[in-house]
Image: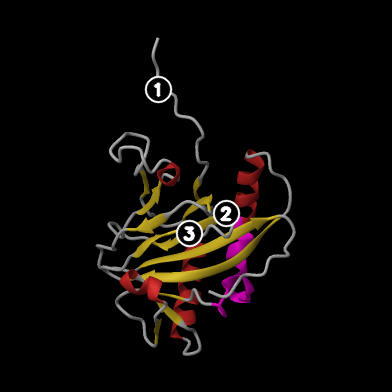
Amino acid sequence: MKKIIQTFPTVMLEAIIDNEEEINTKLCYEIKNLFNNKNTQKRALSHQWEDFVVLTDNHSTGYSNFTTDSNLIKNDKFLFFYEHINPLISDFFAQLDYYGEWHFVNSWAAVYPKGAWVPLHDHKIMEWSGVYYVSAPKDCGDIVFTDPKEYALAAEPPSTRWRGNYKQKFNPTNGKLILFPSYIKHETMPNLSEEDRIIISFNINTGKENYKFPNL
């Protein structure tokens, strides 16, 4: 007898939150105000992401408030969102038999106009990371995760199924929350729609809140 066994799965969460229309209406309002505030630093997305380009306007490359001094976790106007998704995340951890403490380390918003994207990267100094879709029109660009075995099995033929460069795609929709281990490399495809893709991303660590986020 012969069979293929897929071992060592990577556990991720995909969920649609409750009351997503009401939550997203509030988030769109607060995110718009955030980026219209002249004191909010805007980090460029797309090909300028890794160069840490700070914008003075809402540029066509896309923009995020992912900077050293900006953390939505500390912004009272976004507290309702984190309180809303807190039980969902705790329930996910419970399904993994983890019932200990956990906390949001940092969080940021990002706006992707038509053509905007973000390159392959990871958040591996953290434990868990998440993305939430505030506005995700059709064809706004999938998020794509790369099989972490790619780096441990670099000598494997790249076309071998389930090994090497295997990708897992998620199609964005309004109200969708994805939670994943921070070490997994991921990227987003260009937004092909005429509307902005708007997201909130965040990082989570387990245990007591004693982690200081480093300078970026």
Q: Earlier in the sequence, mark 1 or mark 2?
A: 1
Residue 137 appears in which quarter of the rendering? bottom left
Secondary structure at numbered mark 1: loop
In this view, the residue in front, 20 or 7, is 7
Q: Are marks 2 and 3 in contact (CB under 8 Å)?
A: no
Q: Assign the magenta stretch its main secondary structure.
A: helix
Residue 62 image offset from top left, x and y in percent:
35, 73
Q: In the drawing, does residue 128 fall left or right of residue 121? A: right
Mark linked to residue 128: 2
Q: In the drawing, does residue 104 fall left or right of residue 41? A: right
Q: Magenta stretch?
A: 68-85
Residue 19, visible in the rendered structure: no
Q: Nearer the viewer's eye, disc 2 or disc 3?
A: 2
Magenta highlight on residue 152: no
Q: Quadrant of the N terminus?
A: top left
Crowding around mark 3 (Cα neighbors within 10 Å: few <14, some 14 to 19, many 20+) is many
Residue 210 image offset from top left, x and y in percent:
73, 65
Residue marked by disc 3 = 132
Q: Nearer the viewer's eye, disc 3 or disc 1?
A: 1
Q: Amino acid at mark 2?
A: Trp
Which residue appears at 58% of the width and 74% of the height? 71
